[in-house]
């Protein structure tokens, strides 16, 4: 792809000035070159654009006529622990572009305009009912036999042909997209990387203490105590204690590290763009690996909320998870399976949620069978 065209696409995506976009595009092109990614691989994904009216038309064609509207925003969403990424939306998008480029380099995409339009209209409709309805999500279908789905920061979502082949209806596909969208909306990938980076900084700070021979003994003890405290808090967080969120401990630990920095400990001072590259490398590993227990459970139950709000059947959540259990095993193989939940536990979780929160919900998206079958058979 010509660098000028790529810069224009980046400019439109990031809403940045032309000169800034060219600079951003140049850095991304360098990142792609480092990982063997062709910049043209992401051109189609960046060029996807569907109007709000086309999304509404897609939804209305699937809805059963009748009285009553779709459910509004669930009251319990206001009780969710607030999450804030340590980066701007523009930085999140830049990280997502890097990760998306690598994924599109790993797999070929389905080159079918109708299939691409279908999954993007469905995805745009479903994500309009999510926690970040204003984010412009983009969806792509990867040619891969294994059932899998990926989400990258900034709203890039990928599903494999192997996963689609497992599905029986549009409701289950909607749940797949909603689940991945929750990972994006709740900043799971971003926060996972931030936690890992924080641990690295804590380790570096502790190491610096060991080599700072010129520091006075009393001051060394104080610095060592502060850094050790921060290091322990970060390790506790990333080892996945049985808590939904780290709460104030995460902020406290950051404050401790800032104190050490003010006292003279030099943390790793990478420039912003190098940080984004490193961040993208970690985010790519998070996206393509198995996420931790907390993130998966949250994406399951909130993804269930999203599809019910969209008019799809609540049972699609448990049905999809059971299909994955049969296809790849109850406990996916990972180096440390203690951090990843079993499918049987995830099924119990969504069933509990649907019985306590959505017992009276009704499926409204009933005219979807033929379009889903046409989409599935085209792959």
Image (cartoon, helix red, strand yellow):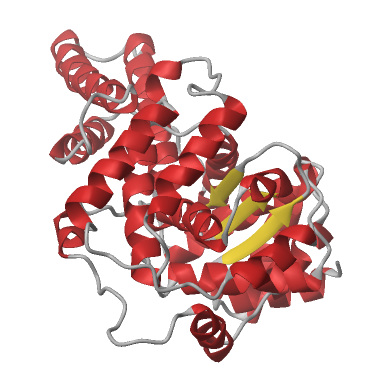
On-image quarter of the C terminus:
bottom right
Q: Look at the picture and state if 343 lies above or below 315.
A: above
Q: Is residue 129 visible?
A: no
Q: For the point 52% across and 61% down, which residue is it?
A: 155
Residue 116: image quadrant is bottom right
Taking the view exactly as shown, the residue that stands out farthest to the bottom is: 53
Horizontal and vertical percent for residue 166? 64, 45
Q: Nearer the viewer, residue 334 or 71?
A: 71
Residue 298: x and y in percent read: 32, 44
Q: Nearer the viewer, residue 99 or 168?
A: 168
- The residue shown at (39%, 23%) is 339
Residue 14 visible in this rendered orientation of the protein:
yes
Residue 296 position within the rendered picture, expressed as x and y whole percent measured from the top left: 39, 39
In this rendered view, identify the residue nearer to me: 202 or 179.
Answer: 179
- Residue 172 lies left or right of residue 224; in this view the side is right
Q: Is residue 99 above or below residue 252?
A: below
Q: Residue at x 22, y 26 (%)?
A: 242
376 relative to 326, above or below: below
Where is residue 260, by image quadrant? top left
Instruction: Give the left or right position of residue 71, taking residue 225 as reference.
Output: right
- In x, y percent, where is residue 17? 59, 80
Q: Quadrant of the N terminus?
A: bottom right
The total of numbered circles placed on residues is 0
Q: Residue furthest right?
A: 2
Q: Nearer the viewer, residue 205 or 287?
A: 287
């Amino acid at each position: 792809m010509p660098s000028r065209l790529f810069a224009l696409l980046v400019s439109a995506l990031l809403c940045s000035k032309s000169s800034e976009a060219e600079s951003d595009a140049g850095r991304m092109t360098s990142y792609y070159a480092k990982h063997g990614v062709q910049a043209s691989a992401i051109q189609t994904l960046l060029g996807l654009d569907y109007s709000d009216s086309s999304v509404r038309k897609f939804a209305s064609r699937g809805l059963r006529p009748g009285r009553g509207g779709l459910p509004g925003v669930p009251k319990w969403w206001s009780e969710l622990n607030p999450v804030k990424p340590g980066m701007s939306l523009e930085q999140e998008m830049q990280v997502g572009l890097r990760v998306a480029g690598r994924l599109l380099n790993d797999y070929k995409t389905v080159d079918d305009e109708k299939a691409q339009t279908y999954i993007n209209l469905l995805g745009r409709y479903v994500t309009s009912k999510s926690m970040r309805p204003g984010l412009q999500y983009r969806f792509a279908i990867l040619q891969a036999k294994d059932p899998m789905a990926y989400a990258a920061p900034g709203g890039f979502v990928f599903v494999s042909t192997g996963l689609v082949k497992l599905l029986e209806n549009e409701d289950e596909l909607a749940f797949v997209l909603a689940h991945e969208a929750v990972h994006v909306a709740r900043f799971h990938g971003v926060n996972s990387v931030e936690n890992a980076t924080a641990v690295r900084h804590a380790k570096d700070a502790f190491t610096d203490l060991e080599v700072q021979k010129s520091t006075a003994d009393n001051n060394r003890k104080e610095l060592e105590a502060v850094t050790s405290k921060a290091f322990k808090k970060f390790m506790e967080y990333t080892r996945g204690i049985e808590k939904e969120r780290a709460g104030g401990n995460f902020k406290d630990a950051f404050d401790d590290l800032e104190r050490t920095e003010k006292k003279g400990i030099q943390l790793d001072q990478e420039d912003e763009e190098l940080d984004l590259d490193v961040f993208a490398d970690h985010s790519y590993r998070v996206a393509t690996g198995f996420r931790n227990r907390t993130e998966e459970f949250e994406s399951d139950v909130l993804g269930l909320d999203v599809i019910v709000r969209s008019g799809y059947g609540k049972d699609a959540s448990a049905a999809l998870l059971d299909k994955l259990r049969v296809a790849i095993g109850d406990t996916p193989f990972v180096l440390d399976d203690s951090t990843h939940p079993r499918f049987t536990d995830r099924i119990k979780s969504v069933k509990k949620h649907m019985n306590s929160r959505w017992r009276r919900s009704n499926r409204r998206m009933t005219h979807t069978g033929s379009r889903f079958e046409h989409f599935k058979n085209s792959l």
